[in-house]
């Protein structure tokens, strides 16, 4: 028999194949969705675990920092307490040493002294006047005058010197800062700061040689990159200018401009120094014939070129 195949059967077969593929696709998609849903909670759990670990580590570091800060504060308090005890001991020793042995001895009457002198055959000197007898009050006053900074810390003495400097009490500021230098660690931060202060004090008070020495001490103990070095270099230039060492002063100013950059104050000081250097050039003697206007103009141009060269 001959089987007949119609187009309707072909269309049914094609629709069935498409339906099968769609069903397979849906099953595959369902498996993917199920796998993603299974993995998502585990990823969230892992992220939560990492977040908790990070928070715990941060809390641990914060606790360590707090403990370290508390330990440092305790050490500072102990050190301050030791310094206070040391200052009290020094003050007590100074007060004890200020007491005169004559004042501590039991007083003797003039009659008893004369009787003793008569028995020994010696001549008794006249009794001392009240002004000549050393009293504890006078001794302590003299000790305080000899050491006006007794019982004070070095930072406190440094601040007192700064207050005196602001009041233009040069001698008092100098005494305070030199006291700090005698007791501070050489080339330590405190000593360097006081050397810098003394350099400025001597520049303003006119003691250029001492200002030069203190400024040089600061520069030897610091780096050219430090601002303290720049201040000392500037003060050394001022001291050299006062000493008449104009070439060396100009060299310091140029070095200062290289290290610190442009400054209006330094520029003005360099201009004044340049004018002073031009004026120091010897002029023509009166015996020489007067110059023509053209020669005078040439001399002025030469002086201007010299001033620009120094700048």
Image: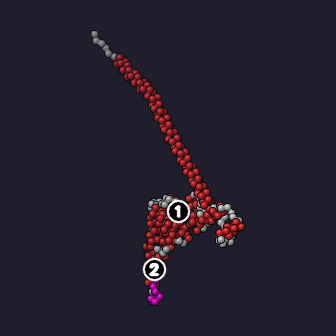
Residue labelled with disc 2:
281
Residue 229, how many percent across, how many down? 47, 62
Numbered badge on residue 139:
none
Is residue 159 found left or right of 246 in the rendered image?
right
Residue mark closest to the camera, 2 vs 1:
1
Residue labelled with disc 1:
182
- Point out the image quarter for the C terminus: bottom left
Residue 153, how many percent across, how many down? 57, 57
Residue 225, how many percent across, how many down? 45, 60
State the residue in front, 239 or 31: 239
Q: Residue at x 53, y 60 (%)?
A: 183
Helix, strand or loop at disc 1?
helix
- In this view, which residue lies farthest toward the left? 1
Q: CA distance from mark 2 to mark 1?
A: 44 Å
Is residue 103 found left or right of 267 in the rendered image?
right
**What are the residue bounds of the magenta stretch?**
280-290
State the residue in front, 170 or 95: 95
Most common secondary structure along the magenta stretch? loop
């Amino acid at each position: 028999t001959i089987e007949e195949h119609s187009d309707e059967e072909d269309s049914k077969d094609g629709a069935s194949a498409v339906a099968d593929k769609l069903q397979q696709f849906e099953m595959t998609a369902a498996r993917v969705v199920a796998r993603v849903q299974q993995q998502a909670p585990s990823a969230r759990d892992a992220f939560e675990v990492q977040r908790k670990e990070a928070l715990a580590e941060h809390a641990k570091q914060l606790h360590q920092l707090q403990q370290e800060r508390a330990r440092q504060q305790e050490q500072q308090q102990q050190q301050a307490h030791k310094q206070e005890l040391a200052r009290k001991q020094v003050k007590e020793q100074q007060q004890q040493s200020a007491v005169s042995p004559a004042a501590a001895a039991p007083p003797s009457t003039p009659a008893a002294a004369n009787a003793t002198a008569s028995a020994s055959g010696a001549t008794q000197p006249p009794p001392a006047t009240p002004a000549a007898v050393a009293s504890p009050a006078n001794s302590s006053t003299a000790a305080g005058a000899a050491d006006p900074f007794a019982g004070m810390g070095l930072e406190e003495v440094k601040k007192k010197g700064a207050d005196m400097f602001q009041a233009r009490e040069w001698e008092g500021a100098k005494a305070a800062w030199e006291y700090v230098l005698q007791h501070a660690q050489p080339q330590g931060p405190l000593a360097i700061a006081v050397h810098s202060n003394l350099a400025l004090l001597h520049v303003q008070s006119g003691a250029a040689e001492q200002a030069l020495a203190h400024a040089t001490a600061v520069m030897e103990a610091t780096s050219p990159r430090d601002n303290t070095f720049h201040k000392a270099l500037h003060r050394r230039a001022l001291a050299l200018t006062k000493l008449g060492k104009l070439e060396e002063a100009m060299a310091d100013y140029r070095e200062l401009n290289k290290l610190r950059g442009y400054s209006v104050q330094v520029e003005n000081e360099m201009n004044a120094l340049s004018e002073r250097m031009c004026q120091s050039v010897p002029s023509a003697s009166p015996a020489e014939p007067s110059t023509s206007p053209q020669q005078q103009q040439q001399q002025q141009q030469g002086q201007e070129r010299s001033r620009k060269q120094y700048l």
